[in-house]
Amino acid sequence: VYRGGRLVRDVRFPTSLEQHGSDAMHTDPDYSAAYVVLDTDSGLKGFGLTFTLGKGTEIVLCAVKALAGLVIGKSLQEIVSNFRGFYRLLTSDGQMRWLGPEKGVIHLATAAVLNAVWDLWARAEGKYHAMYLSIQDPKQIVSCIDFRYITDVLTEEEALDILVKAQEGKKQREDQMLKEGYPAYTTSCAWLGYSDQQLKQLCSDALKSGWTRFKVKVGADLEDDIRRCRLIRKMIGPSSTLMIDANQRWDVAEAISWVSRLAEVKPLWIEEPTSPDDILGHAAISKALAPLGIGVATGEQCHNRVMFKQFLQASALQFVQIDSCRLGSVNENLAVLLMAYKFQVPVCPHAGGVGLCELVQHLILFDYICVSADLRNRMCEYVDHLHEHFTSPVVIQDAHYMPPKDPGYSCEMLEESVNRHEQKKTELLA
């Protein structure tokens, strides 16, 4: 890897203009990305990103640039032959570690850099990422994971055992995914800022396209939530699956009370009911809502594998929602997939944004083929925005993610799109 072109760029899309992505806590998001390009002297490039909501992306760029010295000058083989060590190098720098550790802006930057490394590795082998990961020897996969702080729940030996046992039937599951794809749900119909007319039209269009799983944003106004959820439940019918998402809006008691009022629409889960850091609060909500048949889902803003470990230990969630950019890329997501399997909690990743669908499709394919071997209560979020800006956009067929065909980790953006939407000048606020 050498300093060729521009290592990282600030790319922003004005999605707030039409209220795309709006929820109870983020009323005007502009879907954006810190976009990383790794150049090599062989001419091969690796592309990675981390997702943001607009303002503040320039801070992530600063963090990426601070990590650059740990990457530039290294060969791909040098990195991947000791990937655990490289992950730890990025997350354990004696001075920069203080900014996390393994959380916040510095961890978002770490994810962007590592996503680009995984993309480079798959491209070097001419394979799409999930397929390349799935053909790795289980020992090679385990060697990519940093088990520090989680061995009380998952040891390296246990992880290896899970992966070895999942070798049985792997080829059949791989063929199944190539033929049928991975089940998805849509969040595109019911952003909080959409009008009733928009909700009805989008739900109607989605139903015609084969969607049977829908998520609704809630949390701003209880009576309005009841009305909107009733409207959508009526539109999609009793046999379709409905989820609700509060994006961290409530205190614990308020969450229990509010969701209890929404139980009539039979949601499968309430997502992010309270602070993403409140593990015991999520446990209390989970316990209170269990008699209503409503699970708790969270994880898109869960800092790291250690917090996921505690969520699982505390039975604080019934659906694990990994994010391809919040955690430290594939390396850390592998740890969470394996812990979730051990606790028998289904993984239903967070996606949407800019490039999150493109990235996370690889993780769910790997999870099914090489870890869980189970599709019960499993589905991946899909949001129909901004895919046209990628060289290998996701392919959805009959409400399923179809496996990618192009080499890499699917996060290369069209140069024209990057040039058009890049913030040419970004200044840190005084």
Image: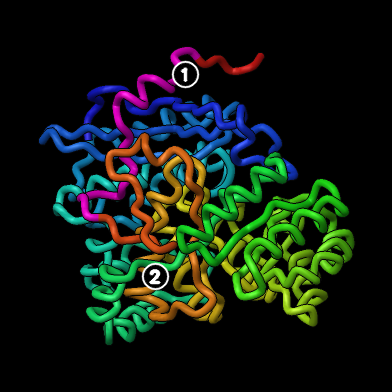
Q: Magenta stretch: residue 233 in it?
A: no
Instruction: Report the front residue among 397 and 80.
Output: 397
| Marking on residue 367 | 2
Instruction: Give the magenta-colored segment's residue range.
Output: 405-425
Residue 418 visible in the displayed image:
yes
Q: Quadrant of residue 133?
A: bottom left
Instruction: Report the front residue among 272 and 386.
Output: 386
Instruction: Specify whether 49 is left or right of 102.
Output: left
**Where is 309 relative to 169, above or below?**
above
- Rendered-image quadrant of the N terminus: top left
Task: Tell me residue 287's x, y (percent).
Answer: 78, 77
Instruction: Specify whether 378 is left or right of 142.
Output: right
Question: Which residue bears the numbered disc 1?
Answer: 423
What amino acid is at disc 2? Asp
Look at the numbered disc 1 and give the secondary structure of its residue: loop
**Where is 100 relative to 17, above or below?**
below
